[in-house]
Amino acid sequence: MLKLENVYAGYGERLVLEGINLEVGDSEIVCLIGANGAGKTTTLKTIMGLVRPQKGQVNFNGDMLATQPVNRIVQAGISMAPEGRRVFGKMTVLENLEMGAYLRKDPIGQDIEEVYRLFPVLKERAKQPARVLSGGEQQMLAIGRALMAKPKLLLLDEPSMGLAPLMVEKIFEIIRRIWKTGTAILLVEQNAAMALEVSQRGYVMETGKIAMEGSAAELRRNPNVRKAFLGRAGERR
C-alpha cells in the first residue's frame, strides 16, 4: 500500500531523514519506534506532504505523492492524527469531526455515528468545546477526526503521549478495533512495548535512518531493542 524509497527530507538546510525505506501493506499495523529526534514525526509529515522530500519517492497504491498537495493525499486515502492532538479547542466535538470530513462530498452522518460507536464519550460531549475534554478524550477526538476522512491508511503520531496507563490501554484497544475494520495503520509511538504488541511489523529509527526492521516478535526478542526501549525484562514503559 505505502512504500517509501530512499527518502531524504528535512527543514530548510537541516536534513532529518537520510535514505528512509519503509513499507506498509494492506490492512497491516506497522510501528515506527525510536528516541526523540530520530525523525519519526518527520517521516509521517513527509508521507502527508507537510514536508517535501528532497530525494526519493513516496508511493501510495501506485501513486507518487512526493509532489502532491496535502488535500490530494487525503483524497488518495491517507489521514493523520498528529502528535499533541491539535484539536480545535473553540469548536465543539461535532464540529471537529465535521472538519475531518471537509474534503468529502458524500453524506457523513453515518460515519459520525461510527466514530461515536468507537468513542461513546464523544457522543456524550458532542456539543461541548473540545478544549474542555480531558487529554485522553482529546486523543480520541483527534483519532475520530482523522477517521472522518475514511482513510485507507491512518497515521498515528504518539497516541499515548501524556496519558494515564488505563487510558493508554484503552487507546491501544481502539487502535486494534480500527485495524480490524480493514484500515492500515502506521504508528509512531514512544511506548515501544505497546507499539510492538499491537503491530505486525516494526522499524527502529536512529538519527534519520532505519537502523532495524522485522516482525514485531523479532524486534521484541532483539537484545538491542530490549535494552534501548523495553527494559531488561522487556516490560512496558
Image: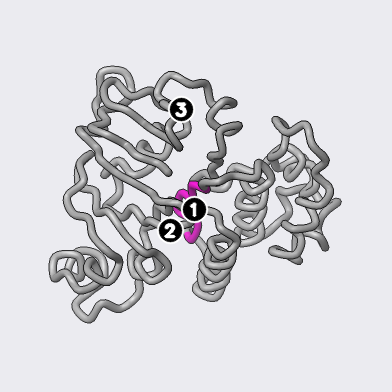
Q: Nearer the viewer, residue 68 or 49?
A: 68
**For the point 30% across and 66% down, which residue is it?**
216
Amino acid type indicated by mark 2: Ile
Dot 2: within a 10 Å radius of its alpha carbon, few (fewer than 14), some, or many (20 or more) residues?
Answer: many
**Between tags 1 and 3, which lies in front?**
1
**Where residue 233 sits in the image (x, y, percent)?**
22, 81
Mark 3 = which residue? 49
Residue 29 numbered tag = 2
Quadrant of the image containing the C terminus: bottom left
Amino acid type indicated by mark 1: Ala
Dot 1: within a 10 Å radius of its alpha carbon, few (fewer than 14), some, or many (20 or more) residues?
Answer: many
Count the marks: how many? Answer: 3
Q: Secondary structure at mark 3?
A: loop
User: Residue 189, located in which quarter of the rendered image?
Assistant: bottom left
Q: Nearer the viewer, residue 37 or 185?
A: 185
Dot 3: within a 10 Å radius of its alpha carbon, few (fewer than 14), some, or many (20 or more) residues?
Answer: many
**For the point 69% across and 64% down, which residue is it?**
118
Mark 1 = which residue? 184
From mark 2 to mark 1, how far is it between C-alphas? 6 Å
From mark 3 to mark 2, how far is it between C-alphas? 21 Å
**Where residue 122 sits in the image (x, y, percent)?**
76, 59
CB under 8 Å between discs 2 and 1? yes
- Give above or below for 51 relative to 223: above
The magenta segment is 154-160
- Give above or below for 79 relative to 121: above
Q: Secondary structure at mark 2?
A: strand
**Between tags 3 and 2, which lies in front?**
2
Asked if the magenta segment contains residue 109, the reply would be: no
From mark 1 to mark 3, how far is it between C-alphas? 18 Å
Q: Secondary structure at mark 1?
A: strand
**For the point 32% across and 37% down, which residue is it?**
4
**Where residue 217 sits in the image (x, y, percent)?**
27, 71
